[in-house]
Amino acid sequence: MATTATLPGGGSKNNVTITIGADASTALQTAINSLFKAAGKNITADTVASGVNGSAGFFNYIPDTVASGKASSLKAGTNVQAIIDTGKLADTLTGSASTTLFVANNAGDVINTATSSTVFGGTGADTVNASGVTTVYLEGGKNVVNLAGGDTVNLSGTGGSDTVNITAGTNVVNGSYAATVSVTGSSSNDTLNLAAKSTVGITGVKDNVSVAGNTQSITLSGAADTVRTSGTGNTITIAAGSGDSVSTGTAAATVAVNAGNTVDTLNLGAKSTISVTGTKDNVSVAGASQTITLSGAGDTLSTSGTGNTITIAAGSGDSVSTGTAAATVAVNA
């Protein structure tokens, strides 16, 4: 369901009506009102062209209403607080250090922020290259948000099938709906506060990632990554690479080690389930009442904790050590 927000334009006949998703209309109207208040005593917006500086003391914005022909590339100058695109093409909106509000309309828009901003996407398939703290309201479709270091994105509203790409640095993702987060950079430090049933993929090397949320699906395929989770019902897969460390606090999780020739450390909450299907893996498991199944070959398993149940279901040449703790071991292979 769509609704509207209003941009005052000097009399009701000159007002600009912006159609927006119902989940975002209040936030957009609040953002518009806040920019008027911050700009000064002027109560109407001042329109400026792309690449032109705005006048001090006004709420300056770049409008775009083009419905056909060539897509627009809009670039904000100094003192331009907003770019508002009500056209119907796949446009590019690039802000300056003054620009804190972006409104897209059609599918396939590209939004480039230069400072902390609020972004309202179009009808889907938008790309947001975020800088600073960015709050996004993205509509349906497959939208993408890119973070390159020192950035925070707040996924607000209902969103679509959205992906956040993290390529470098220290970043924060806060999600109010399920999304996909892809960590491709190396040696990054990222905090992910995600809605239930989100998906996290880590392909970089020596990344340090904290994931909060329930029923997350997390896959590690880089190397020497550190993952800490909080929340219940999470599924973690080590698909490739070696030297990974996984900690789940007091929460149980399901962990699958599918890679071969890895050295991995798992510090898990009680009653977790671990499966090792790779070959020549070296896996250390800390935690009580774990259920562990080995079905690869030539694996080395060491555990610390009481009440663990270990099953060798397939393969040959496995080695199991439980330290001083008793365990139940079944060799079914």
Image (spheres, rainbow, N blue to C red):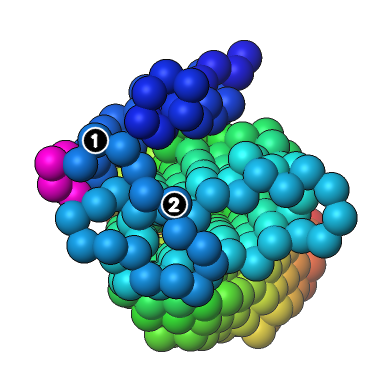
Q: Amino acid at mark 1?
A: Ile
**Residue topped by disc 2:** 47
As rendered, which of 207 and 34 lies closer to the eye?
Answer: 34
Residue depicted at 61% across the width and 35% down the height: 139
Q: Quadrant of the C terminus?
A: bottom right
Q: Main secondary structure of the magenta part?
A: helix
Determine the residue positioned at 77% across, 60% down.
71
Q: Which mark is residue 272?
A: none
- Identify the image quadrant of residue 197: top right
Q: CA distance from mark 2 to mark 1?
A: 13 Å
Q: Secondary structure at mark 2?
A: strand
Identify the magenta region: 37-41
Residue 133, given in percent of the width and then of the height, sits at 31, 59
Badge 1 crowding class, 10 Å Cα cut-off, few under 14, some 14 to 19, many 20 or more, is some
| Proximity of marks 2 and 1: CB atoms separated by less than 8 Å | no
Query: For the N terminus, which image quadrant?
Result: top right
The residue carrying mark 1 is 43
Report the front residue among 108 and 298. Answer: 108
In this image, 280 relative to 282: left or right? Answer: right
- Residue 196 among magenta residues: no
Q: Quadrant of residue 42?
A: top left
Indicate the amino acid at tag 2.
Thr
Above or below residue 41? Residue 149 is: below
Q: Position of residue 190 (x, y in %)?
A: 36, 67
- Residue farthest right in this picture: 69
Q: Is 101 left or right of 249, judged from the image as shown? A: right
Q: Residue at x 13, y 47 (%)?
A: 40
- Front position in the image: 109 or 290: 109
Q: Can residue 265 be seen at all in this image of the molecule?
A: no
Q: Position of residue 80 (x, y in %)?
A: 36, 61
Q: Nearer the viewer, residue 208 or 118?
A: 118
Percent from the top left, x then y, of residue 301? 52, 70
